[in-house]
Image (cartoon, grey):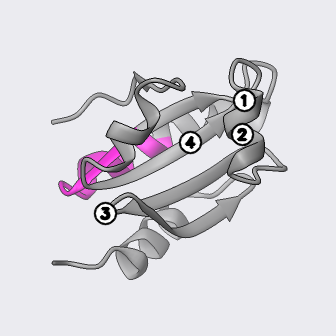
């Protein structure tokens, strides 16, 4: 099982998104909805064994955040084979996010 605390930075971001099916959580310490998403992301990661979750602090890496056109928090980007395939912004209840991810994740 992967670890929800996969903290990403400019050095490990690309290898992480190329490692399979990954969901990147763009968050900030001051963002209350971001904090509420953490247990939901952990539950989704446990429910979907093919999914790895990583987190990127937007305050620490503004260039990467801008490059990926993240404008609101929290923003979740789903990557498969190193390419972004889906984006969700704002707080997501667990059942809605899990259903969305199941729909978007393609099995290869």
Report crowding for label 4: few under 14, some 14 to 19, many 20 or more residues within 10 A (C-alpha).
many
Decide: marks 2, 1 in contact (CB < 8 A)? yes
Residue 108 on the magenta segment: no
- The residue that label 4 is drawn on is 25
Of helix, strand and loop, which one carries label 4?
Answer: strand
Of helix, strand and loop, which one carries label 2?
Answer: helix
Please give the label number shown on residue 81: 3
Instruction: Identify which residue is drawn at 50% across, 45% down.
Output: 24
Specify which label sits upstream in the sequence, 3 or 4: 4
Specify which label sits upstream in the sequence, 2 or 1: 1
97 left or right, relative to 65: left
Decide: marks 4, 2 in contact (CB < 8 A)? no
- The residue that label 1 is drawn on is 58
Decide: marks 2, 3 in contact (CB < 8 A)? no
Residue nearest the viewer, comparing 68 with 32: 68
User: Over which residues does the magenta segment extend?
Assistant: 40-53
Looking at the rendered image, the disc whose residue lies closer to the viewer, 3 or 1, is 3
Q: CA distance from mark 2 to mark 3?
A: 20 Å
Residue 6 vertical placement versus 82 (above, below): above
Q: CA distance from mark 2 to mark 1?
A: 6 Å
Q: CA distance from mark 4 to mark 2?
A: 11 Å
Which quadrant would residue 16 be assigned to in this image?
A: top left
Please give the label number shown on residue 65: 2
39 left or right, relative to 106: right
Of helix, strand and loop, which one carries label 1?
Answer: loop
Looking at the rendered image, the disc whose residue lies closer to the viewer, 1 or 4, is 1
75 left or right, relative to 106: right
């Amino acid at each position: 099982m992967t670890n929800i605390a996969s903290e990403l930075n400019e050095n490990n971001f690309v290898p992480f998104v190329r490692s399979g099916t990954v969901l990147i959580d763009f968050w900030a310490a001051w963002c209350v909805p971001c904090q509420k998403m953490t247990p939901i992301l952990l539950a989704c990661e446990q429910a979907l064994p093919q999914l790895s979750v990583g987190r990127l602090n937007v305050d620490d890496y503004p260039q990467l955040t801008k490059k990926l056109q993240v404008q609101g928090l929290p923003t979740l980007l789903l990557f498969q084979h190193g390419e972004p395939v889906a984006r969700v912004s704002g707080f997501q209840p667990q059942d809605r996010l899990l259903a969305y991810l199941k729909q978007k994740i393609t099995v290869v």
